[in-house]
Structures are given as structure tokens and as C-alpha cells.
Amino acid sequence: MLQRNPHVSQTHHDAVTMRELRTTLFFSVQDQVGALDECLHALKAADVSMTRIESRPSKVAERGYDFFVDIDARTKELVECVVEEIKRVKIVRDVRIVSSLGALESLGGGEGSQGLDQQVPWFPRKVSDLDTFAEKVLEMGEELSSDHPGAKDPVYRRRRMEIVQKAKEYRSGQPLPHIDYTEQEKDTWRQVYTRLRDMYPKYACREFLHVLPLLEQNCAYGPDNIPQIEDISRFLKDCTGFTLRPVMGLLTPRDFLNSLAFRVFHSTQYIRHHSDPYYTPEPDCCHELLGHVPLFADPNFAELAQEVGLASLGASDEDIEKLATIFWFTAEFGLCREDGSIRAYGAGLLSSFGELEYALTEVPTRLEFEPSKTVEQKYPITEYQPVYFVADSFRDATAKLREFNATMKRPFQVRYNPYTQSVDVLNSKDKVQHFARSISNEMQLLASALEHV
């Protein structure tokens, strides 16, 4: 799920000697004066560069903090040395390597390889690399702001923590967590589902309206049942290859968008507080399952979403900001033309009674979806959007997005391999030739099929 921060970082790779390792370390420290300075001194002693640091209240050290630190190291041995240096700091608890990647080796290689900028950000190369996003979230699902309807409800907070823990423990290949929703949670869902279901025929796009009954038939969507993401994920995979994955809370825009490249959507499983079923300050399962999920079963929308994801792999921070804005004005708050009228396809609209109706009035400004102009548009996150962008169709939006992506500064191209659920980096002559041969084979198949039509 992507919010504006926006409602938007690796499994451990085989041990190999590399020219450079980009590694994320996790450690917890007790809260005392100079605690972080001691840890940073350990990094300095190992002669490594720190490229990013994130922190949050610790789940390990009492009255302490958890840190995620990205470092650039030259060898695997140097990474191990850094870990040992940090372990020597007495106030540190639970030091471990969250992720590591040989950025240069994994991106390069092969005849005719073009050298890449060493500052290319790390990105996942196979679907199991998404496991490392499990603990790297901007906000935890059980951490509620003071104005959250459930902030002062200890029962609700404990329930959220229970659900979030299942997302934290999930790893690729495992069955998706099953949540036994309570009657109170089902009642909240019922109120949301019933009201939105009545509005959809008037406001939702035809693709959404086509898929929703299929979800009701195949995934137990309905007013009296909160569907399980395992059932939904199986259905989506059969339709477009998209799958769902549980998430603890808000991911960074980069991590969220990277996942879309693999046709993976991170979905929360907790639900909004029962005291106010028609309001939530964050994405919950109502937003994910009613707003987002249906269109991931549509081939043309799935292609649009994956195109955003593929463009995000190894993109600069500036380009990630642009892509997150495009996602905001398409998958979250997008409008489209349909038979002379305007319809909604964005999840932020399709899961919000008030804004769904508001967006199709004459009050907000509606502009043509043009990525180069869309990325310049600023937007609020706590109120209705003053501006919406209208696409002629998902195919047209995808075509425009591809043209825009070609202007980005990334020094290589990527393609998704659905057979291995991995990303191929097309940065060498032999890789491009192999890709060309696969296209040639597909063209021969196409020509043969046309002869029989």
C-alpha cells in the first residue's frame, strides 16, 4: 500500500566475493546518551560508508530504538567485520544482516556489458527479495497516531499487533496468513461493503464492475464475510499473474513500487476501528480489497501497474518521486472516460463514499492524463483532491507512461521474466541478443497464429 509519505527495502544472497556489497544492517540499542554515536564509531572503525539510516521504537531493547543502516562495503568479509564491530558495542542487541546485494556484479556481467553508475539504488532481482521489505516500513500497523479512532482502545491495538505480527513473519512461498475476523470486524466490513456496493454501478468503471461479481463468486466477497487474501491472491494469479502479500504498515514509495514490477501488491489485513466505519486515516483491508484488488484482475490495468513498477527499479530518488505521483493520480485517484461519461478507477475513490461522489461533480478540476504534466502536480493527503487526471483507457495510459519512462535517467532497461519471477537487467550485448531471440520466437508464433485466423 502506498501513502504520501506517500499510500507508498532483500533475501540473503548466496555468499560470493564481490567488488562491492550494498548491505542493510539491523540492530537495537538501549536508550542512553551517545548510544547511536558508539554504533556509528564502529562503522567508522571498519572503514565503510553509511548511505541511509532509519529508526523506530525498539521491539527488542527495552526503552530503546531499532536501526536500519545501509552501508557500502567492498567485500563480504568487510560486511562481516562491520557486524562484529557493532556486536562489540555493549548497549547493542540483536545485530543481523537484513539484506545484501553485490550491486555491481549483479547488474553487470556478460559480453559487451556497459558499466553502471555505482550509485544505482539497490532493487530486488527476484520475487523472494521482497521478503526483506517485511521489517522496513515507514509506519507499523500497530502504531496509531493520537487522532486515530482506535488510538485509545487497548483491545483494538492488541488485535492490530496480532495481525501485523503475522505479516512480519510471512516469507515468500508460505501460505498467506489466514485471519479469523471477529464479529465486530465483520460488522464494520458489512457497513462499508454495503454502502459502497450500492454506489459502484453509478460511479465505477466497467472493468471494475465486471470483476467485482467474479470476486463475489470465487473469493467469498460479500457483506457478511471479509475475504482472505490467500483466496484473492490465487484468483488474481489466474487472471493476470498478480499476487497479494501481507504488509505490516506503510512501505516507502520505492519499496512499494518495486514490488509492482513483480506483479505483487502489498496488502494490509487489519480493519478500521468500529467506532467510525466510514473513516480511516490509513489504508486498511477495506481500502485494499475493495479499492485496489478488483482491477488487478484486469489485464490492461495490471499492465499499467507493472509498468510503473518496472520503471521504479534502480530509479533515482527524483524519478521515484515522479512515479509515486503518477501512481497517486492513476491507481489511487484516477478517472477514465467511458461512453461519453467519466468514471472512477482509483482505489482511493472506490473505497471512499464521500470522495467517490465528489470526484465526479463539477467542483474539482479534471485534467487530461499526461505523465510529464501529472508528475508536477502537488496534492493533499488529508482532504479531497482538488485535481484529478482523466485517462482515455488503461491501454492509452500505459502507452503514455512508457513514453515518459523512456525519458528517465536510468542507465539500463529491465524486463520481467514471469517463468522465474525475476528481473533481467538488459545492460550487455549478450543479454539484449537473448531477449531479441525470445521476441523473434514470439513473432514467429504470432505469424503462425495469424495464418490460421
Image (tube, rainbow, N blue to C red):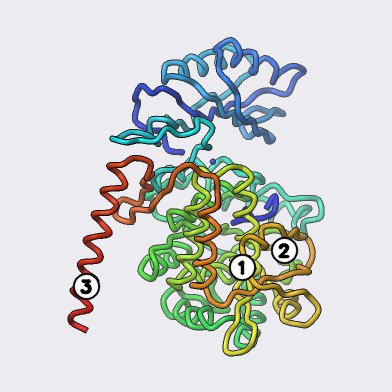
- For label 3, count other residues whose C-alpha is less than 10 Å away and answer few (under 14), some (14-19) or many (20+): few
- Mark yes or no: residue 204 visible: yes
At label 1, the amino acid type is Cys
Residue 376 x, y percent position in the rendering: 71, 57
- From this view, report whether residue 13 is shown above or below residue 316: above
At label 2, the amino acid type is Thr
Where is mark 2, residue-wise? 280
At label 3, the amino acid type is Ala
Image quarter where the C terminus lies is: bottom left
Where is mark 3, residue-wise? 447
Q: Nearer the viewer, residue 318 or 229?
A: 318
Residue 355 x, y percent position in the rendering: 73, 74
Q: Quadrant of residue 238?
A: bottom left
In the displayed structure, does residue 123 sit left or right of residue 35? left
Kindly state the secondary structure of the residue where label 2 is placed: loop
Where is mark 1, residue-wise? 286
Image quarter where the N terminus lies is: bottom right
Kindly state the secondary structure of the residue where label 1 is placed: helix
Q: CA distance from mark 3 to mark 1?
A: 45 Å
Q: Earlier along the polypeptide chain: callout 2 or callout 3?
A: 2
Q: Are marks 2 and 3 in contact (CB under 8 Å)?
A: no
Residue under the image location 57 percent in, 89 percent down? 339
